[in-house]
Amino acid sequence: MKERGNAGAWYRWEAWGGFLFLAVACLIVGLLKPRFLSPANLLTIAQQASPLLIAAVAQAFVVMAGEIDLSLGSAAAVISMVAVMSAKSLGTVPGILMGLLTGASLGFLNGIVVTRLRVPAFIATVGMLTYAQGIALYLGGGVPIEFPPPSFAWPGQGFLGPLPAVTVIAAMVLIFVHLVLTRTVFGRHLRATGGNRLVALLSGVHVQRVRLAAFVLSGTFTGLSAIVLASRVNSGQPYLYPSLPFEAIAALAVGGISLRGGEGTVRQILLGVLIFSAMSNALNFFAISSYVQQMITGAMTVLALLFSRWQGLPRAKEGG
């Protein structure tokens, strides 16, 4: 199924103009702060961007299906707690697997509530946000779970040659997702479901299964992002990354993915995340306080969502 677009000229601009804007902006910052474009700092940006990139992939699956998931932040907190607890008692690999399984299970639960109980995704995932946050606090008694095995730190802090391990993991995720979206029946059905649920249903697409699978994939990749984040701080945190779902949504919007559903590419996900991460890094070079950075990020998020709304308001889906 072909991607939707407004017009050929707009599509070409969306495809390349965003990266051109990013390159020019980075060049300007580099002229003012030469260390910004140093290889070491560019690797730092890549390392910092990678967890958000994986989380944006997680959000992209549900957005492309015409849904939304606001529970990523609390889900990541639960996953980090479970992964570290399991790693302490069973070892690093079982801990990582338990974290991924927890993420997939939370995604499955979200999907069941949305597809079988027909609760709107916004309401269902806000409920999961509160529920998961309670679990995260309960598991650790309100405090972090620390001291996993030393090997647990490798995904978030280790290197493969000159490259951060987390960046290699994120690159593999992008390749995998690109193949899923462009080379599989599921990828075509995902876009069809998000584009027009009724037409997809009449075309023989198992709409409910596709939507459920999108939530499960979202939960699994949220699990991977949470494991990387927990590995970076070497602990399970009950408040690991509260703004994760909103930053992921904003990154998709900045990259050009409409919240209407039915469209999206790996290139767009990468562009949005790189813009966010490069901006944050540049603000640090200019010694902008963290409070002002939060204000700027919030304003950028609102503008990105307004732009997505300008592209087209989310439509009510029929059928399924």
Image (spheres, rainbow, N blue to C red):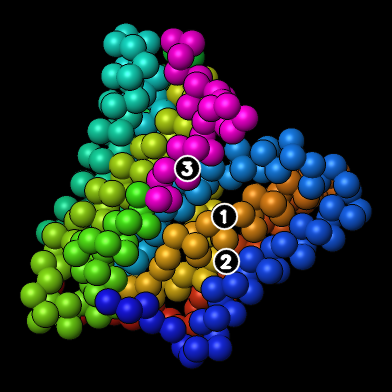
| Dominant secondary structure (helix, strand or loop) of the stretch shown in magenta | helix
Crowding around mark 1 (Cα neighbors within 10 Å: few <14, some 14 to 19, many 20+) is many
How far is mark 2 from mark 3, CA to CA?
19 Å
Q: Secondary structure at mark 1?
A: helix
Task: Kindly identify which numbered label has been placed on residue 192.
Answer: none
The answer to whether one can see residue 133 in this image is: no
User: Where is mark 1, residue-wise?
Assistant: 273
The amino acid type of the residue labelled 1 equals: Val
Q: Based on the displayed image, in which of its 4 quarters is residue 201 positioned?
A: bottom left
Residue 183 lies, in percent from the top left, at 27, 62
The answer to whether one can see residue 45 in this image is: yes
Q: Residue at x 33, y 12 (%)?
A: 91
Q: Residue at x 55, y 88 (%)?
A: 9
Q: Which residues are magenta?
A: 149-175
Q: Is residue 62 left or right of residue 80?
A: left
User: Where is mark 2, residue-wise?
Assistant: 254
How far is mark 1 from mark 2, CA to CA?
8 Å
N-terminal-most mark, 2 or 3: 3
Q: Is residue 57 left or right of residue 290?
A: left
User: Where is mark 3, residue-wise?
Assistant: 170
The amino acid type of the residue labelled 2 equals: Val
N-terminal-most mark, 1 or 2: 2
